[in-house]
Image (tube, rainbow, N blue to C red):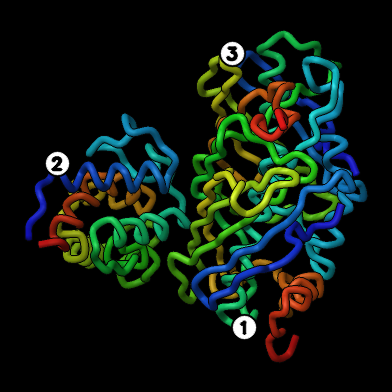
Amino acid sequence: MRFELLDEIAERSADRLVAHKHVGEADDYLRDHFPSFPILPGVMMLETLVQAARRLAADLRGVPQDAALPAMVVAEVRKVTYAAMVRPGQTLTAEVKLRKADADAGVFDFEGVGTVEGKEAVKGRFRLRAVNPSERLGQPALAEN
Amino acid sequence: MPIEYEEAMAKVTEVLEDALGVDEDEVTPEATLGPDLGAESIDYLDIVFRLEKSFGIKIDQAELMPNEVLTDPTYVDGGKITDAGIAELKAKMPHADLSSIESSRDVDDFEKVFTVDTIVKFVQARVD
Amino acid sequence: MRWVWLDRIVELEKSKRLVAVRTVSWGEDVLHDHFAKEQVSDGRAVPCMPHTLVIEGMAQAAGVLAGHANDFREKVILAKIGKAMFTPDLLATPGSTLRHTATIERIDASGAATSGVVELIPPGGGADDARPFATIDLMFSHVDQNRQGLAFPEHNFVFTEQFMALLDVSGIARPVGH
C-alpha cells in the first residue's frame, strides 16, 4: 500500500496549500471500508489534510519540493467534523492554512477543509509536530536495559 | 442556587473550547456560534452534552437553539420569518437579542443572533 | 491495507465501556511508508503508527461499543473528532501494544458521544508498563436517523463480517441476525 496520499499540489503560498487526492484502486482499504459500500474513512480524510499540512510545513522549512515529506505526526486534533462522503472515482481537495508556527520547536497549527465536487466533506483544526530520530527507540527507559 | 454571569461565562467558555476547538480568547460574549466560532450542526449536540455535564442540568437541544422554528411553514414564508415566527422565537429564546433578525426577517440571519451571551443567559436561567 | 485496527476486545460492559488491544507490527505495510528513511533527518526510518490510525483504532473501539448498545441495528458513522491529544515524544513503534478504553458519555436515537483513552505498552512490556498515549473524544451519528435522503444502503454496511469475527475471537456473542 501507499501511505503517500497526495496526488498533486494545486496551489501553494507561504501560509496556504491546496492538494488533490484521487480516491480509487490504490486505496485498497476501501475493500474493508466497507465491502458493500466503499467510502473514504473519515480518518483518511484527516490524514489527507495532515499530509497537505506536512507539505506546507516542509515548504516553510525550505525542504525541496521534490523531496519526501519530512516525518511529522498529529500532536492534537482540536475539532474535525464530517459533512459528506467521498466515494471511489471522486477527488478530495484538501486546503490547509497555517495558523501558528514555532519552527524551532517543530510545532505547527493548521486549519483545513476538504471538499468533494465543491461540497465540504471534512473540516478541522489540528497541530503537527516534527518527529525526532531518537524517538525510533520508542521507550527511552527500556532502551537502556 | 443562582449562578453569577462571570462564573457561568467561564464554564461556557471551557465547554466551547472543547466542543469547537477554539481558543479561549475567541470566546467573547458577543461572538456568534456559527459565523465567529465555526459551530456546525453536530457541534450543537456536543455543546448540549457538555453543558449538561458541566452544569449538572438536562437540556433538550431544541430548547437551547429552536432551529425547528425556521423550518416550520407557520413561522417562515419565502425565507422570511413571519410575525408569528418572531413571537415564537422570542418565547423560546427570552434571553437572546433578536433585534437584528426582527428587522431583517432573514432566516439566514438567525445564526447571527445566537451568541455566547445567549448560551450563558440560557444556562443561568436553567440553573436558578 | 486491512481496515480493522483492533486485535481483540478484552472488556465489554454493554452501553458503557469497551477495552480493546492491538499490537503494532512490522507486518503492516503502512509502517514502511510511515516513516521511510527519506523522511527522517538522520536518514534512517522511524516506523510508527500514524496518529490518524490510532484515532481510527479508538473510533472502531467506540463504534463497536455504540453499535453493540443497540445490537448492531444502527449504522454508526464517525461524525466528529472532538478533541484528540497525544503525549509528546511518544510513538507507537513495532512491538508496542495499544490499549484503547472507550466510554459512552451519551447515546440516544441520533447517535453517541464517547470519550477514550489510549495507553501504550512498550515492546516487551507488561500492563504495568502502560503509559498514557492519547485521549480521544468522538461523536457518532446513526445515519438512518440523521441522513435520510443521502444515498446510504438499507442494510447495515458498517458492521461487517470482520467486526463480527472480532467479536468471535473476543468470546463475545454475535447479536441475533448477524
Residue drawn 67% across the image and 52% down it: C126
Q: Residues within 10 Å of mark 1 (few under 14, many from 20)?
A: some
Report the disc number at residue B6.
Answer: 2
In percent of width and height, residue B21 lies at 44, 40
Amino acid type of disc 1?
Answer: Asp
Report the disc number at residue A103.
Answer: 3
* Residue A116 is at least partly visible in this image: no
- Left or right: C76 with respect to A93? left
In percent of width and height, residue A45 lies at 69, 45
In the depicted structure, whether residue A42 falls above or below residue A56:
below
Q: Chain of mark 1?
A: C
Secondary structure type for disc 2: helix
Tags 2 and 1 on a common chain: no
Find the distance from the CA under tag 3 to the CA under tag 2: 37 Å
Closer to the camera: disc 2 or disc 1? Answer: 1
Amino acid type of disc 2?
Answer: Glu
Q: Which quarter of the figure is the C terminus of chain A placed in? A: top right
Tags 1 and 3 on a common chain: no
In the depicted structure, whether residue C131 falls above or below residue C169:
above
Closer to the camera: disc 3 or disc 2? Answer: 3
Residue drawn 34% across the image and 60% down it: B48
* Residue B51 is at least partly visible in this image: yes
Q: Chain of mark 3?
A: A
Report the disc number at residue C71.
Answer: 1
Within the image, what quadrant is residue B67 found in? bottom left
Q: Chain of mark 2?
A: B
In percent of width and height, residue B85 lies at 26, 64
Q: Residues within 10 Å of mark 2 (few under 14, many from 20)?
A: few
